[in-house]
Each structure stands twice: as structure tokens, then as C-alpha cells.
Image (cartoon, helix red, strand yellow):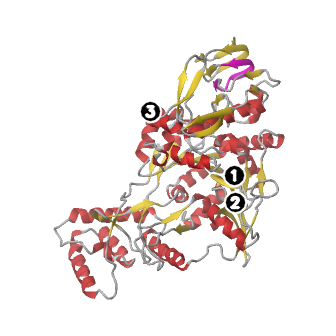
Amino acid sequence: PRLIAASGGTHELLRPTATMADDQPSKKRKTESTLEANRAVFSEDENAMIDLLLGCGQDHLFESWPAPGEKDDDKKRFLAQARVCDQGYPGGIAAYVKNAKKLLRDSKEGVNPFDGWTPSVPAGVVVDYGDETHVALEKTGMEEIGDAAFVLVAGGLGERLGYSGIKVELPCERATDATYLQLYVHSILALQARAGEGKEIPLAIMTSDDTQAKTLDLLERNAFFGASPEQVTLIKQEKVPCLTNNDAHLALAKDDAYALQTKPHGHGDVHALLHTSGLLKKWAAAGKKWIVFFQDTNSLVFRVVPGALGVSKEKGFQFNSLCVPRKAKEAIGAIAELAHRDGRKMTVNVEYNQLDPLLRATINPDGDVNDEKGGSPFPGNINQLIVSLPEYKAQLEKTGGSIEEFVNPKYADDTKTKFKSPTRLECMMQDYPKALDASAKVGFTVFDNWVGYSPVKNSPADGVGKFKGGNPTHTATSGEMELYGCGARVLALAGAKVAESVDFAANDIVVPAGPRVVLHPSFACTFDEMKRKVAGGGKIKILSPESVLVVEGEGVVLEDLTLDGALVVKACAGAKVTVKGLKVSNKGWTYTPASGGDEIDALRGFVVEKNETETLVFDKPGEYVVP
């Protein structure tokens, strides 16, 4: 793969530092004297970095520096880290400090970012998966898919979930133990196989210091899951310096006077990385027209990509947010059109904790409430995005990839002059449209949750709290059962007769659990393709909610099947397999609730006992009929 960007610092603790002030002239003179004496130790570039920091009012960083000959290597280490931070931020450290001062001043003064803006429901498309309109949209999307590139935002570890590894290495289900990254790469390869000769679909993965090496290792250990190493590029996000006060003084590490404390800047950095890495120019030169952004643990997203891309094409959307129906006050951002009193307009994401007060202050004194249909009129943003590459590339060339930022300091008291702990500027990828002018076509595409949105982002303990509050748990337990449920429901829409789901309890939550259906991306990429490969009229029968069906291979066709147990069908490329008149009845698999065990079992709260399985593997090209 191509590896882009370099390593930055990683420090978590604050070293208390004195603030340089005009009433400390003797201390300032001493610092300046010592620093000037050190100048001969450094190269021209290192001295330039010192000058840059001094010009930004960061004199305090050098207060503890000793005379030349002492700690010189540490001093150089500090300047090297500062250089990484400078290069990793659009405009460098000077721009970072300038932006921080403004945002910190606004925060202290309580400036309302939505002052003067009035919200309304924007233009978008609500898609009913499987109907004629959806099938037509998928057809349009598949005509465009070969001209798309994909970007996976994968900078996070699984610590929040209770997992010590990277999130994309988690299995999305235990039937096949396919990891999220494996599922994503196989999905892209399946789309690529249907895009026509010579249409390679590139994948860029945004990593971080925490995930870069582990992501590369996962890819290399698994031969890139069948992808060409050249079509995968890792772009690494750098961290940004932390801030100790409203003067935007940079923080030093508590246990290291020669290291800046840094933290993640947010997934909005993906835009700058695509720009500075040269990927946008490369993709544009290769004839790519679209970029699809997706998150690290949503196993269902590729079910809705073809239809959503069809919407982008037909509506001419420069920016298309994939959405789900939203309930009032649900903890998910909402897409809204905002009109300013000065005539400006923009269609953007509004965070759920900002939407209610915005609505109360403008169009609805009741705030964020459900409409007569029982849901919020504002669609829920799931941060899966599709952008039109030509306009996107041109916009980033104007802005350098910078995205509107925010700051969220935790103040020590009501004076708002001291922070409880260092803060930093942050940015979000969904805020890109804020920089677009009113003529840009920005919209959304809504699919139901069951087919497009099943994130795994909460630990088992947090999931219990969500469950007790009547909210989606978004745990590994729910994620796995929702993946199976999606497969079973798609089969039912195609004409199969599928057993109803039953309640399944694990990790102190209860989720619906029906037949464990895993449809590998190679089997079918669109609903129309699914219908052509799955016989209607109830000829495919899955009799019990505990049954397991795993299907892999583009050449598999299910014409007549009765299943009560576990069946695995795998066909290699070139193998055409027709399942016709097959009856499977065996002991199947048992999903047994359990506590403890390894991390992966503990996350799910159950173990899988594979008692008996009918396994049909066709590893040579040819035509086969089963039985």
C-alpha cells in the first residue's frame, strides 16, 4: 500500500507552565537570554521553528531550557515534534493558534454559532429498500460505481468498546469471523467485479498513530483480503497541540518538558489528508467521479451504497449524506437547511444537543419533537457520505482542506479563565458543506436502519444503559444480530419464507434474533441481483429462527431450499452452483449466552457452538447442481 503522512507526538498529561505576561519582564529577559545562547546548537530550520513559536506568543515553552550543552537532544526532539504539528495542520501552528484564540474568545463570551440562522427540512430522497424506485436507483448507481473511490475513516482503537485492538479487526459476526476490514474490502472487490474490465476501485484508509501500524499489519497478514496492494492507501492523521488557556498557550507534557501534549483533531482531517496526499489529483486523473466515505464499524453500509450513489447521480448532489429516520431528541445529528437573516443558506449537520435549542429559538417553541408520523422531520446523519469528486477537489484546492472547527473547554469556574484540563480544536467530516456557497447542491438519502445502519460503538456496560433507556444499544451483540437480520429480511423481500425472529438475551440486553443469515458481498451487490438469485414464491424456506445460512460466491443460485439447521455454501470464481431441491435438517449451531471468555466473546456476551453443519464448497470452476 501507499503510506502517507508521518508520525506525530502522543502525550496525554499536562505540565503546568507559567504564563508569560507583561508584569514578568525579568523572567522574560532571562528566557530570551538563555534561548539566544542556544541558537548556535540548532539548524536553520530548527531556529525558524523557534521563531515561529515565539511569534505565536509561545515563549513559555522555552522557560525551562538550560544552557547549551545540556539536554540538546531533547530540545531538538521538541522542535522536531513541533515541526510535525506545524506540517500537519493547514496553515501551520500559526494558523492553529490564531484560530484557537478566536474560538476560545467566542466560547468565553458565549457566542451562539447559530445566531441569525433559521432551520428547515432540506431537500433529499427517502428510499424504500426493494421497491421499483430503489431498484432503478441501484441500477444508476452501479453504472457509476466503477468511477468511485472509497475512504474508510479508521483512526480509533476499540478501547471504548472494551477491545484492546483496532476496531476494524473486530469480527462483524461469528458465523464466518470476517473482520470489518475484510467485509469492506470484499464489498469493494464485489462492486469492482461488476464494474467492468479495467475498473479498479481504490480504497484510502485514514489511520492515526494508534492504528497505522496495526492496520497495515492486518492487511499484510491477510494478503490485503484479495485486493491489490496498490489500490489501498493509508493516510495518517496527525494530532494537534493542546491548549492551556484562553491565550492559546500550547501545553507541555507533565512528565516531559520537551514534548507538546497532543490529541486527535477529529475525523474532519480526512478532507485535508485527501488533498495534501495527492490522492484527489490521482483519482481525478484516473477518471474517478465520486468518493464514498464510510465509518469503521457499520457492517450494513454497502447494502445502501449503490442506491445512494444513484441518488447523487440523478439529483446532481455535490454532497450527499446517508441518513436514517430519526426520533426527536435521539442522540444522533440531524441534517437541516439553515437560512441566515443576511440571505446565506447552507445544508449541514446540526448536533442533536444543538438542534433542540435552535428549534425553540426559531420555528418551534416545543423544540425537537416528533411530527404526526411519529418521527422527527429532520433525518438522522450517520456520517456515511458521497461527494462529487470534481467539485470537491476544486473546493479543497481553495481551502487547503481546512474544515470549520470548534472548541469545548471545561472551565474551572464561572470566570472562564482557567481550564480544568487542556483542550484542543476539533473538526468533523460532516461539516465540510459549511464552506460551500448557496449554489452547491447538498442533499441527503434516507434508508431504514435495518438495511443501512448498525454501528458498533458502545461497550456492553454502556449498552445496558442504552437498553434500559429504550434506545438502540449499538453494541457488538446488537451489531451481529442486526447483520443476520438484514440478510434474512433481504431474502424475505426477494421471495423467501423466513422464520420470524425471537428475543435473544446476552450481556443484560435483549435484541431480536432470527435466522443467522450471512450473504457474502460476492453473492449479490444489489437487490435486483438478489432477486435473480433467490427464487420467489416461498421456494426458499428457513424454518427456525436458530437456523444458519452462509452463502458466498457470485455463481450461487438458490432455487429450492428447505433449511432447519446450518448450511454453508461457498463457490469460487467461475463456479456456477444451483441449489435445487435441497433439504437440510441437522443439529445446527447454538448461540449460548455466556459471561467472561476472551475479549471478543465478552463483547458479545455469547459463544457459538457449531454442533452440525452441512458444508458445500466448490473450489473449482464448473457447473454444479445441488443435491
- Would you say 233 lies left or right of 142 here? left
Identity of the amino acid at label 2? Answer: Ile
Residue farthest to the left, as pictured: 69
Q: Earlier in the sequence, mark 3 or mark 1?
A: 1
User: Closer to the camera: disc 3 or disc 1?
Assistant: 3
The image quadrant of residue 521 is top right
Residue that badge 3 annotates:
597
Whole-number angstrom distance, CA of label 3 to CA of label 2: 41 Å
Secondary structure of the residue carrying tag 2 is: strand
Residue 550 part of the magenta segment: yes
Indicate whether 62 appears above or below 21.
above
Considering depth in this image, is 598 or 255 the residue closer to the camera?
598
Secondary structure of the residue carrying tag 1 is: strand
**Residue 125 visible in rendering:** yes
Density class for disc 2 (Cα within 10 Å; few <14, some 14-19, many ≥20) is many
- For the magenta stretch, what is the residue range? 548-564
Q: Position of residue 199 (x, y in %)?
A: 63, 39
Density class for disc 3 (Cα within 10 Å; few <14, some 14-19, many ≥20) is few
Identity of the amino acid at label 3? Answer: Gly
Considering the image in quadrants, where does the C terminus appear? top right
Indicate whether 3 appears above or below 478.
below
**Residue 293 visible in rendering:** no
Whole-number angstrom distance, CA of label 1 to CA of label 2: 8 Å
Considering depth in this image, is 232 or 609 the residue closer to the camera?
609
Residue farthest to the top, as pictured: 627
Q: Are marks 1 and 2 in contact (CB under 8 Å)?
A: yes
Residue that badge 2 annotates:
335
Residue shown at the point (64%, 38%) measured from the top left:
511
Indicate whether 453 appears above or below 561.
below
Residue that badge 1 annotates:
323
Whole-number angstrom distance, CA of label 3 to CA of label 1: 36 Å
